[in-house]
Image (cartoon, rainbow, N blue to C red):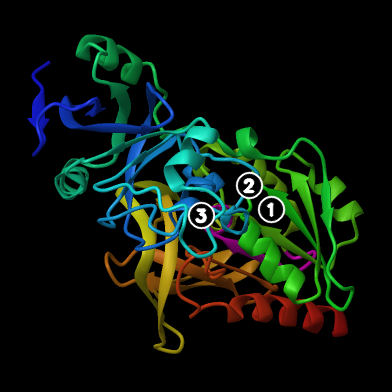
């Protein structure tokens, strides 16, 4: 295979190789490679630690479009889960600013502690443009001494993201109860990869959140006697999660339901819609989404490689009554929200928890808790 070499600095101590043969050279940092996975990019100007610890980035190598990464260090407060899920960090300029206010560890030292390889000095602008043109694809980060034919073999052995069930990989092995102050509802979540900032938002509103393995049956979920059900974000292909969609079909209409990201895709499948893989996904903190019911535009955080097929404003008949496709992404028109009109259920593709990102949509947590209160008062 012919290799397209793309580097402004010449050969370095490490390189990124894509499955189509495109190569980007740079300098190794963090832990040592090699690692393989799907190579994606995120456009957030901050939140690098939140990104790599977000379960939705499981099995992916993240290319950061921000020109400098690591300038405010790493800290426990920025963890979105109990570990790193991304396989590598690809950066234009990585820094190890352990003296930054709030830093408990330098970014690169922290990556090494966590066993996560990084590479700096990469022409990330060219890499991102290539992914935008050719689509997100498998690739790997390799020490310079790794022969390219060996690297290609490792990349080829990496499973495609299409058809891949990663929810069952990141889901907890046992139920976990996280209690608020008791002033809010009791909410059950089938945990396909929840973020700490989502938990924080529910607990701040007094809710008690019980996280269950995503393989939990509908009868077991209902036996918890929850006031509402939350559908969690997470990694992988929603089309591979038929078992979760079947579970969800038994839950919708029994108690209020609210979903985010992967949860949006699962609820959409439950009402009869299809999902598909985006060319390069939506990842970052600057995506405009329009609520077609009000005309309001929110700037949102997003992290997903799959989307729901449909047309904004469309209404359809489902086994749960009528559903409306309520929100669209203003970049490409993809569906970003659905509301069921006859039962209390809805979802959004974007992330309202602002961890990190805009605060425009934090009110969705209050809206869900309000729906729970209204359903139980009726």
Q: Nearer the viewer, mark 1 or mark 3?
A: 3
Question: In this orientation, does residue 319 appear?
Answer: no
Mark 2 burial class by Cα count in 10 Å: few <14, some 14-19, many 20+: many
Tag 3's secondary structure?
helix
Q: Is residue 290 above or below residue 33?
A: below
C-alpha span from label 2 to label 3: 28 Å
Range of the magenta residues?
A: 253-266
Q: Is residue 244 left or right of residue 337?
A: right
- Residue receiving disc 1: 249
C-alpha span from label 1 to label 3: 32 Å
Residue 34 screen position, x and y as percent: 37, 21
Residue 23 screen position, x and y as percent: 17, 29
The label shown at residue 245 is 2
The label shown at residue 2 is none
Q: Residue at x 25, y 32 (%)?
A: 27
Tag 2's secondary structure?
helix
Q: Nearer the viewer, mark 2 or mark 3?
A: 3
Q: Residue at x 25, y 13 (%)?
A: 145
Q: Residue at x 45, y 51 (%)?
A: 274
Q: Is residue 93 above or below residue 286?
A: above
The label shown at residue 50 is 3
Q: Is residue 189 magenta?
A: no
Q: Is residue 302 above or below residue 346?
A: above
Residue 21 screen position, x and y as percent: 16, 24
C-alpha span from label 2 to label 1: 6 Å
- Quarter holding residue 374: bottom right
Tag 1's secondary structure?
helix
């Amino acid at each position: 295979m012919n290799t397209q070499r793309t580097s402004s600095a010449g050969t370095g101590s490490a390189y990124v190789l894509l499955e189509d043969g495109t190569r980007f050279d740079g300098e190794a940092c963090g832990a040592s490679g090699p690692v393989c996975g799907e190579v994606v990019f995120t456009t957030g100007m901050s939140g690098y630690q939140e990104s790599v610890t977000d379960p939705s980035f499981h099995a992916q190598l993240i290319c950061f479009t921000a020109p400098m990464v690591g300038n405010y260090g790493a800290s426990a407060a920025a963890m979105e889960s109990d570990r790193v899920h991304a396989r590598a960090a690809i950066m234009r300029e990585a820094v190890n600013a352990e003296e930054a206010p709030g830093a408990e560890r330098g970014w690169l030292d922290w990556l090494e502690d966590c066993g996560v390889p990084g590479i700096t000095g990469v022409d990330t602008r060219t890499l991102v443009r290539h992914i935008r043109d050719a689509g997100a694809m498998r690739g790997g980060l390799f020490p310079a001494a790794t022969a390219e034919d060996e690297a290609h073999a490792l990349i080829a052995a990496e499973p495609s993201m299409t058809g891949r069930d990663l929810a069952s990989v990141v889901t907890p092995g046992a139920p976990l109860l996280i209690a608020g102050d008791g002033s809010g509802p009791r909410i059950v979540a089938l945990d396909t990869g929840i973020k700490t900032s989502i938990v924080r938002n529910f607990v701040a509103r007094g809710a008690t959140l019980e996280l269950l393995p995503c393989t939990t049956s509908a009868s077991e979920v209902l036996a918890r006697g929850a006031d509402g059900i939350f559908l969690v974000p997470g990694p992988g292909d929603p089309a591979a999660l038929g078992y979760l969609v079947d579970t969800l079909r038994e839950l919708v209409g029994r108690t209020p339901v609210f979903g985010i990201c992967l949860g949006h895709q699962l609820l959409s499948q439950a009402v009869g819609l299809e999902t598909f893989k985006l060319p390069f996904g939506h990842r970052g903190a600057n995506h405009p989404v329009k609520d077609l019911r009000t005309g309001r535009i929110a700037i949102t955080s997003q992290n997903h490689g799959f989307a729901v097929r449909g047309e904004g404003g469309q209404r359809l008949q489902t086994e749960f009554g009528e559903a409306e496709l309520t929100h669209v992404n203003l970049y490409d028109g993809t569906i970003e929200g659905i509301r069921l009109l006859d039962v209390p259920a809805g979802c959004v593709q974007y992330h309202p928890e602002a961890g990190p990102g805009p605060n425009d949509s934090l009110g969705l947590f209050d809206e869900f808790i309000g729906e729970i209160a209204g359903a139980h008062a009726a």
